[in-house]
Amino acid sequence: MIRCLVVDDDPDIREDVCDYLQGFAMDVRVAADGRAMRAAMAAERFDVVVLDLMLPDESGLVLCQWAQKTSDAAIIMLTAQGDPMSRVVGLELGADDYLGKPFEPRELVARIHAAVRRSQRGREAQPAGPEEGQRVRFGDWIFDRMRRQLLSAQGVAVSLSAAEYRLLTAFVERPGRPLTRDQIIDLTRAPGVDVNDRSIDLAVSRLRHKLGDTPRDPRLIRTLRGEGYLFDATVEPAP
């Protein structure tokens, strides 16, 4: 059963969407604002969050970024039909998909199923090579691909957004190899997600921040001027 959190300040939309999704055997919770969303996600684990862009207390973009850092739930943004820039920014911040208002409820169901399938494939994929196992070690970090998170030397877990997970996967599978932005785009592209040079650079910046890396003194992700990036680390299987 898919566990879904619907975040929208319109009570009619919350009730209608909740009732409709429950008709497709989903376990649905609702939240009217950012505060309620944060409380719900602290209390329960969700497979997908349907998140309205416009909320009374916090921007949906800020909440999207927070959710991607703190959970492995897929994020579907609800945006106004005439607001393409917010959609672009939302995807760059790690949203898995978006849907313009007003929307067809059956399309929302299809997008939820697609987003959850992509998320599950990312957690469950177990390629054959030893460097592509569920858990790999590099530097002071362990990358747990099943849980889509990093573990520090002190055992602190750091969640990864869908975009960060795909990016780090591409890096750990190709350590020491220069990757152009075009190559990274091909390696990290996901259905329904528009990936470009800017979104790659943003994902690299966010991943560096989580790894404690900096562009001026990179230990792990090196920038190759005019080319792309190189993951400068020894990658080995972790217990």
Image (spheres, helix red, strand yellow):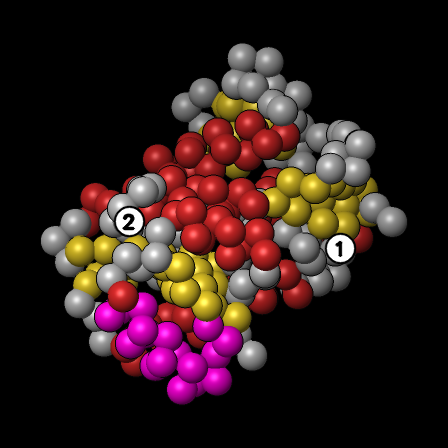
Residue 181 colored magenta? no
Distance between mark 1 and mark 2 Cα atoms: 40 Å
Give the image location of residue 10, x and y in percent.
24, 62
Give the image location of residue 39, x and y in percent.
51, 51
* Residue 170 visible in image: no
Quarter placement of the N terminus: bottom right
Q: Is residue 141 above or below residue 166?
A: above
Per the rendering, the mark at residue 121 is none
- Is disc 1 in contact with disc 2, using a CB cutoff of under 8 Å? no
Q: Magenta residues?
A: 12-28
Label 2 packing within 10 angstroms: few (<14), some (14-19), many (20+): some
Q: Which residue is denoted by mark 1 in the rendering?
A: 133
* Residue 13 visible in image: yes
Helix, strand or loop for the magenta stretch, by majority = helix
Q: Which residue is denoted by mark 2 in the rendering?
A: 55
Q: Secondary structure at mark 2?
A: loop
- Give the residue displayed 48% in from the left and 49% down from the top: 38
Please tell me in which quadrant of the rendered image residue 153 appears.
top right
- Three-letter amino acid code at the position of disc 1: Gly
Q: Is residue 209 above or below residue 27?
A: above
Q: Secondary structure at mark 1?
A: loop
- Give the residue displayed 82% in from the left and 47% down from the top: 237
Q: Nearer the viewer, residue 149 or 205?
A: 149
Q: Is residue 227 above or below residue 67?
A: above
- Three-letter amino acid code at the position of disc 2: Leu
